[in-house]
Image (cartoon, rainbow, N blue to C red):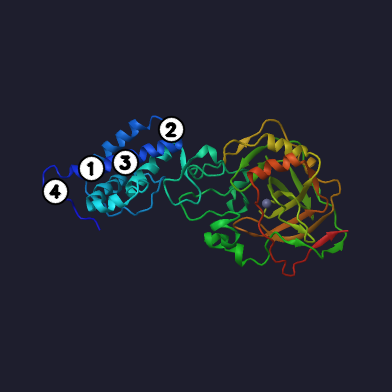
């Protein structure tokens, strides 16, 4: 679309430059006014200078390429795109007059956007216009800049990635990351990565609505939990507590070590159709790598000491496994009545691996409304939808 500029007069090229510069200047001033930032004027002068210099460089073929703020080549790519306003300004005076002041050339939009990004502003959610910027601090839910991947220190359990239900590295530059709603929501999990296929093809998925269990006598789960140090990780999907070796359970003469526990809101499992306010999943692994998860349902009531200790140690940053002061006695998280439902299922997060032994405690444990609110502010909804039971055996301790 672009036609090179061949000025008839040796100084003719200055006309579009002046026009672009004026446009740029006003756009930046408007931006500064909207953001309440002062002192932008020197920046705009610099930007105009850069723009003028760049118009001398070869024009673009990629002006419509999406901006990739995290791409390291950004600096190299800029000259090409920023050359556009001069070309556009040259195109027609009519067009320029017809354009309201709020619609500067697209390269100006991008320049403004970049400046705004540097100044800590983000585009308003749902807006396609780079004019609709808002200062990030006003909207705590809007992500600022994606965190670099793989900063998350995998927990002890992380040695086996497939068995780590929640310590999945983030891939901000890749395709949609899995989530609980939107493009990366549960319906799309299987399509996000080949290794997530079980999320849709699996026949024994979790969670389920637990009903019609067969009532039998089952030996109690032998809990071997003791006070131990712990660390807390906000992995972007939940709050997870990682534990050192030493805690475990024995079920069917098999010992499973407790690796971590984490929370969902509302409860993922249902009992006869009933949802609970939250659930905590205690994830264990035996020496062969088999997983056993104990689910403790949480309902509104009195304060829960283990939950409080975890909330007190919430990390300020996501994806940083943060050692907590003091110790935690996980046994305080268990209900008095330790009868349970049991069935075979899967991880409830990608990769949705099956072969997980589930034990859902029948008696819920209470947490206070304040404790519930704290988690709700971080994760209002992080529960996978109910999966088909598909004739699976569910046993229930009578
Ligand atoms: Zn879970």
The residue tagged with tag 1: helix, strand or loop?
Answer: helix
Label 1: how many Cα within 10 Å (few below 14, some 14–19, many 20+): many
- At horizontal 61% and vertical 36% (from top left) the residue drawn is 315
Q: In the image, residue 169 lies at what x, y percent?
A: 54, 48
**Label whose residue precedes the other's in the sequence (1 or 2):** 1
* CB contact under 8 Å: marks 2 and 3: no
Q: Is residue 50 left or right of residue 123?
A: left
Q: Which residue is mark 3?
A: 24
Give neighbour class at mark 3: few <14, some 14-19, many 20+ (Cα, 10 Å).
many
Left or right? Give the position of 257 relative to 36: right
Q: Is mark 1 within 8 Å of ligand 1?
A: no
Residue 50 seen in this snapshot: yes
Residue placed most toward the observer, 110 or 231: 110
Do the residues bearing badges 1 and 3 touch, measured as CB atoms within 8 Å?
A: no
Measure how far apart labels 2 and 3 are at the Cα level. 17 Å
* Tag 1 residue: 17
Pointer 4 residue: 7
**Count the marks: how many?**
4
What residue would you read off at disc 2?
37
Q: Quadrant of residue 268?
A: bottom right
Q: Secondary structure at mark 4?
A: loop
Residue 206 image-quadrant placement: bottom right
- Whether residue 56 is visible to the viewer of this picture, yes or no, is no
User: Of marks 1 and 4, which one's residue comes earlier in the chain?
Assistant: 4
Q: Residues within 10 Å of mark 4 (few under 14, many from 20)?
A: few
Report the Cα–Cα distance between label 1 and label 3: 10 Å
Distance Cα–Cα, label 1 vs label 2: 26 Å
């Amino acid at each position: 679309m672009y036609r090179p500029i061949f000025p008839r007069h040796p100084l003719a090229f200055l006309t579009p430059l002046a026009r672009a510069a004026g446009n740029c200047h006003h756009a930046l001033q408007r931006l500064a006014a909207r953001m309440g930032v002062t002192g932008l004027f020197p920046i705009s002068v610099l930007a105009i200078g850069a723009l003028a210099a760049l118009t001398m460089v070869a024009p673009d073929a990629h002006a419509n390429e999406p901006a990739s703020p995290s791409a390291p080549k950004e600096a190299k790519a800029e000259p090409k795109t920023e050359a556009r306003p001069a070309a556009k300004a040259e195109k027609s005076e009519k067009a320029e007059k017809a354009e309201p002041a709020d619609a500067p050339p697209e390269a100006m939009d991008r320049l403004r956007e970049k400046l705004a990004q540097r100044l800590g502003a983000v585009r308003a959610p749902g807006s396609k216009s780079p004019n609709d910027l808002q200062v990030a601090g006003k909207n705590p839910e809007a992500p600022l800049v994606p965190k670099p991947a793989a900063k998350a220190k995998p927990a002890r359990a992380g040695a086996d990635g497939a068995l780590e239900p929640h310590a999945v590295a983030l891939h901000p530059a890749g395709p949609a990351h899995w989530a609980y709603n939107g493009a990366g929501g549960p319906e799309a999990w299987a399509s996000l990565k080949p290794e997530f296929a079980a999320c849709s093809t699996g026949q024994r998925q979790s969670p389920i609505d637990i009903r019609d269990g067969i009532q039998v006598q089952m030996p109690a789960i032998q809990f071997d939990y003791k006070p131990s140090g712990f660390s807390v990780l906000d992995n972007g999907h939940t709050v997870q507590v990682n534990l050192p070796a030493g805690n475990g359970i024995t079920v069917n003469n098999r010992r499973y070590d407790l690796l971590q526990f984490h929370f969902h809101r509302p409860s993922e499992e249902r009992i006869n159709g009933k949802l609970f306010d939250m659930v905590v999943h205690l994830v264990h692994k035996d020496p062969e790598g088999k997983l056993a998860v104990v689910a403790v349902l949480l309902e509104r009531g009195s304060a829960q000491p283990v939950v409080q200790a975890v909330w007190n140690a919430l990390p300020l940053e996501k994806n940083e496994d943060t050692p907590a002061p003091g110790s935690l006695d996980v046994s305080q998280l268990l209900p008095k009545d330790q009868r349970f439902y049991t069935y075979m299922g899967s991880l409830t997060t990608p990769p949705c691996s099956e072969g997980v032994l589930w034990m859902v405690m029948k008696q819920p444990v209470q947490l206070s409304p304040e404790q519930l609110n704290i988690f709700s502010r971080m994760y209002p909804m992080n529960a996978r939808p109910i999966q088909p039971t598909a004739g699976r055996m569910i046993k229930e301790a009578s």
